[in-house]
Image (cartoon, rainbow, N blue to C red):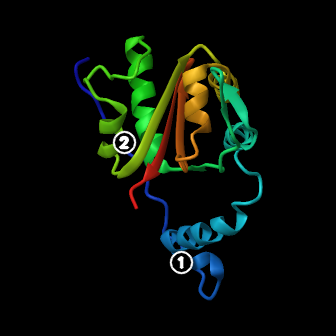
Amino acid sequence: MGSSVQIRPPRPARRARPKGRAFCYPLGVRLLLLLALLPACAGQGADPVLEALNRIRAEGRTCGGVYHPAAPPLAWDARLTAAARAHTEDMAAHGFLGHVGTDGSTVRERVEREGYLWSALGENVAYGPAQAEAALRAWAESPGHCANLMDPRFVHAGLWGREGYWTLVLGRPRP
């Protein structure tokens, strides 16, 4: 009753690798080749959320009674996305909405933690929208958030959402 037996399946016989075929390259080499081809495909099927964000910026708009002319398009930045993700996950896990994390961190600290050296920085947070595009529309209708969206100093963005919590981090790197 108190004993156990471990049975291991027999090892499969090793197959000889076929020689002289492209499929024989080690997995790492094949992955590197695939990654090298990705930039060529980047223009196909662009990110609809980034497109929506840049559509907002492409049209001049009034934010809280102040007119903002069209602003240049933004590009996603992985470091800003990581900072947005960390803050969104914190808000969702602890059920709060705000710009200061439960660890006392500010957007400045979260962005610097990810290695983004900035000269201009902004953050929008939201709770409620189920989709990123809905969060963007809500921010476009809110004076302070709209001003962030339209700020021409920003060239990069990072966005993360979870369970209705959203963080958008906007930045411009140091020269």
Question: In percent of the image, x 30 and y 43: which residue is there?
Answer: 113
Give the residue furthest to the front: 66
For the N terminus, the quadrant is: top left
**Residue that numbered label 2 is attached to:** 111
Give the residue furthest to the top: 95
In this image, 46 relative to 35: left or right?
right
Q: Nearer the viewer, residue 26 or 97?
A: 97
Residue 24: image location, x then y, percent: 58, 78
Q: Is residue 95 visible?
A: yes
Residue 68: image location, x then y, percent: 66, 36
The residues bearing labels 1 and 2 have C-alpha atoms spaced at a distance of 50 Å
Question: In percent of the image, x 25 and y 23: which residue is there?
Answer: 104
Residue 32: image location, x then y, percent: 53, 71
Instruction: Give the mark, 1 or 2, whose residue is nearer the N terminus.
Output: 1
In this image, 101 relative to 142: left or right?
left
The image quarter in which residue 141 lies: top right
**Residue that numbered label 1 is attached to:** 16
The vertical placement of 149 against 23, above or below, is above
The vertical placement of 39 against 154, above or below, is below
Q: Nearer the viewer, residue 116 or 57?
A: 57
Residue 62: image location, x then y, percent: 69, 27
Q: How many marks?
A: 2
The image quarter in which residue 89 lies: top left
The image quarter in which residue 132 lies: top right
